[in-house]
Image (spheres, rainbow, N blue to C red):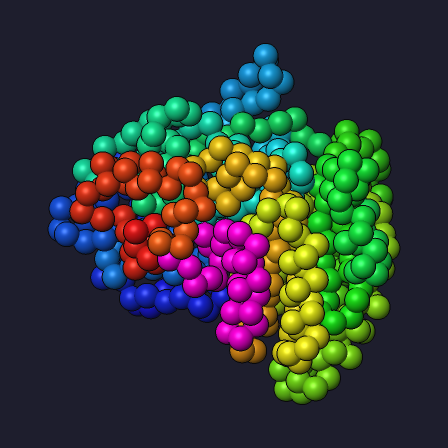
Amino acid sequence: MTWSNWARTATCSPAGRAQPRSEAELAEVVARAAADGRSVRAVGGGHSFTPAATTSGVLLNLDHVSVLERVEPVPETGSTLVTVGAGVRLHRLNRMLAEHGLAMRNLGDIDRQSIAGAISTGTHGTGATFGGLATQVRGLRVIGVDGTVHDVGPGDPLFEASRLGLGTTGVLSAVTLEVVPAYDLRAEERPVPLAEALESLDGPDGVVATSDHFELYFFPVTGRALTLRNTRVEPATIGRVARAGRAARSFLDEELLSNGAFEMVNRVATAFGGLTPRLNAVSARALSARTYQAPSYQVFCTRRRVRFREMEYAIPRESVRDVITEVDDWLRTSGENVPFPIEVRFAAPDDVWLSTAHGRETAYVAVHQYWRLPYSRYFEAAERIFVTAGGRPHWGKMHSRDSDDLAPLYPRFDDAARVRLEHDPEGVFHNRYTRKVLG
């Protein structure tokens, strides 16, 4: 049976598929596959745009390895350690945490991935003082080629190589996360001219430095942007009517306007490419200012029902204005048919070995294309701009780089390679994509 990812950019026909119901069963499957000389890859929500999960060997689905195992308060820090099965999807994890009065410190904007897939590919959110999901990991259980379960934590090389390693050191069976007391976000969305948005980014008084979580979107060639500024606040003691109103507006904005109508816009742009500049202008004018407050995970995460392809690069923070301007200029001069907005986010430097934010203040620029439209010329042009700026490609999104290109960008690249070789000398946990990007 053929497997395909969500974006329809990767497919495979594995020799075997397995959906173990426990860690012990998972370990047995891994050991047996390795003994039979088969490769092993695990798949979660299939939201990686790359072939990261593909295999001709055994494809593992970890949906049943997804229970909440432990909740351990850490009084000295005010945080809590939570251990969950590696296959739990983020939307389920967020609800589990909420039931205990807890929340993730930061999240990306999609919650359909498994926690193992999200950390392994470098999923991140936005916020100049916040790292990606892998920075919130405090422990892992990793199943090796012989079925041994390795329980590892910070400082252990296997931990450091596994919390963001594309699943190449073993199969993750459990993840321990440092979480925080539940909080709300006060969300402020404002349409502004793109030039104004870019001018406001930098400096100690800029919106990136003065916001807990800031991001912006802009539609190509319109000169208009939508800024999103989220401020962390105590959970609101508001009535059910107010929350119901927020939910109703969320459905209107996210399901009807952002998904249903946007699907129609992209279909029209596909059929009549000459209309795209006008369609983008209409979409940009439809953006409106609004402010609301809701639990953090409801604000961070949105549903994406319009299928697309995506490339995202992490670039040095100081280069972001020039990079955005160059991409927008290319779109204006090329006449490329692109009805999807460009997304810009920010992250703090971290010490995760293969994190795209390793060692530097980072801006993320993501370009998207509707899945029925050609993307190669657009992505190639954007990639040239990103690479010139010293960009690192997101491990789970489309790019053309290989290990020779990437190794100089990561100070701990060789350390990660050494750990992989030590724990998987035969390459059981590799596939064609991981060999290309990691060597």
Residue at 52 percent of width and 36 percent of height: 359
Kindly indicate the quadrant of the structure image that contains residue 101: top right
Residue 11 appearing in the image: yes
**Looking at the picture, does residue 316 appear above or below residue 423?**
below
Could you tell me residue 360's position as x and y percent? 56, 39
Magenta residues span 376-402
The quadrant of the rendering that contains the N terminus is bottom left
Q: Is residue 305 above or below residue 422?
A: below
> In the image shown, does 43 or 384 lie closer to the viewer?
384
Q: Residue at x 29, y 36 (%)?
A: 419
Left or right relative to 205: residue 297: left
Horizontally, residue 250 falls left or right of residue 46, namely right
Name the one closer to the observer, 47 or 284: 284
User: Image check: 331 left or right of 421?
Assistant: right
Nearer to the camera, 271 or 165: 165
Name the outermost residue toward the left: 36
Q: Position of residue 137 (x, y in %)?
A: 48, 32
Is residue 64 visible in the rendered structure shown here?
A: no
The image shows residue 266 at horizontal and vertical percentages of 66, 76
Please identify the quarter of the rendering in which residue 294 is found.
top right
Identity of the residue drawn at 41% across and 47% down: 408
Label total for image = 0
In the rendered structure, does residue 389 fall within the stretch colored magenta?
yes
The quarter of the displayed image where residue 370 is located = bottom right
Percent x, y for residue 344? 66, 54
Q: Residue at x 65, y 34 (%)?
A: 129
